[in-house]
Image: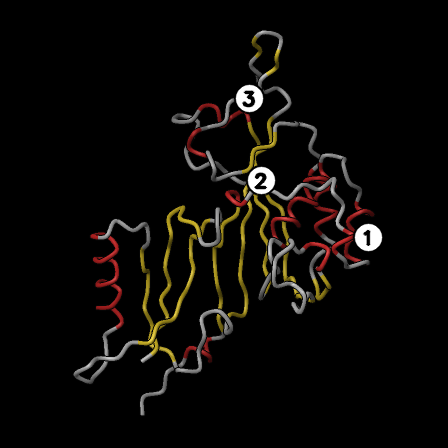
Amino acid sequence: MRFLTEDTRHFIRTDKGVHALLSSAHVDLERHTGGGYDPECLTVGFNRYFEKAKVGLRVQKCQLVPDTFHSRHSAKCRTYLYRLAVRKQNAPTLQKMGFKYLAEIPFSEWRRCYFIQNPEFNVDAMKQAAALFPGIKDFRSFMGASRDDRDIRTVRSMKELCIKPGQQFLSDDYMPSCKHYDFWEVTCKGQSFLYRQVRRTVAALIAVAQGRLTVEDVQYMLDVPSKDSWNPKAVTVPPYGLFLVNVEYDPQDLLYEIN
C-alpha cells in the first residue's frame, strides 16, 4: 500500500540550507500479517516517533494513493518563498574606531531571511524585471553548476513570480530592531526548477533593484540561455532565505480505488 505524507519541517532544511514549511513524500507499507493501515493512525504514529527521536519534523496528513503516484514526479506545482529584509534609509548604524557597522540584525530572523544593508533598493525596477520570467522559457543561464547537468532539460514553465511586502516573525515589541528593515517576499511557482534556479533568479532581481543590473541585462540572460550568459554582478543569494511552502497535485492522481 502506498501512502502520501504531508509534512512540516519547522525551519529544518530540505536541501542544504533551505527550509521547508510543507513538503511531501510517498512510502510503500505492507503488513506481514496482511491488511491495511489507517492513515490517521499512521499520522499519529509517525509524529510520536519523531517527537521521541527529537526530530524537527511533523506529519500533517497521510493519504492512501495508487501505486502509480510519485511524490516528486506527480507534482503539478511547487511554490517557493524567498524572504528579504532591506535596511531603511533612516536606520541607525553603529560606528566604532572609524569603521561604520551595519544596522543590527534581529536574532529572530537570523538565517531565516536575507538581509540587505544597502538602502538603495528600487522595488519598482525589481518588479519590472520579475515580469520577464513567467512562461515557458529556457532557464539555463539561471541554473547553478552541478556535476550532472549535461543532459538536463533546461526548459521550464514558471507560472508566477511575484514580489510583495512581507512581515517579520515577531512583533517590534519583542524584536525592536525589526523596525529598521522593510521586509519583502518573492514567491515563485512552477512545476519544477533547475538547480539553484530560484536563488539565482532572486539574485538577478536584487541586482536590478540595487542598480547593478538593468532589466535589459536580465532579458539578455533569458534570450541567450547559456552558463556563459550569467552576469556575475548578480551574486547568488544564500539558501537560508528560501522556503518550500507548498507542493500541489492533480486530485485525480491521488484517487485510490478499492478493489
Q: Nearer the viewer, residue 73 or 182?
A: 73
Q: Residues within 10 Å of mark 1 (few under 14, many from 20)?
A: some
Mark 2 lies on a secondary structure that is strand
Check residue 4 in the rendering and tell me which mark sits there, or answer none: none
Q: Residue at x 76, y 36 (%)?
A: 212
**Residue type at mark 2?**
Trp
Furthest-top residue in this view: 97
Q: Percent x, y for residue 81?
A: 54, 50
**Residue type at mark 1?**
Tyr
**Residue type at mark 3?**
Ala
Rendered view: 83 above or below 194: above
- Name the residue carrying label 3: 103
Where residue 184 sits, quadrant-wise, is: top right
Mark 1 lies on a secondary structure that is helix
Q: Answer with mark 2 or mark 3, whichever residue precedes in sequence.
A: 3
Q: Residue at x 66, y 27 (%)?
A: 119
Q: Answer with mark 1 or mark 2, whichever residue precedes in sequence.
A: 2
- Name the residue carrying label 2: 184
Q: Residues within 10 Å of mark 3 (few under 14, many from 20)?
A: some
- Name the residue carrying label 1: 220
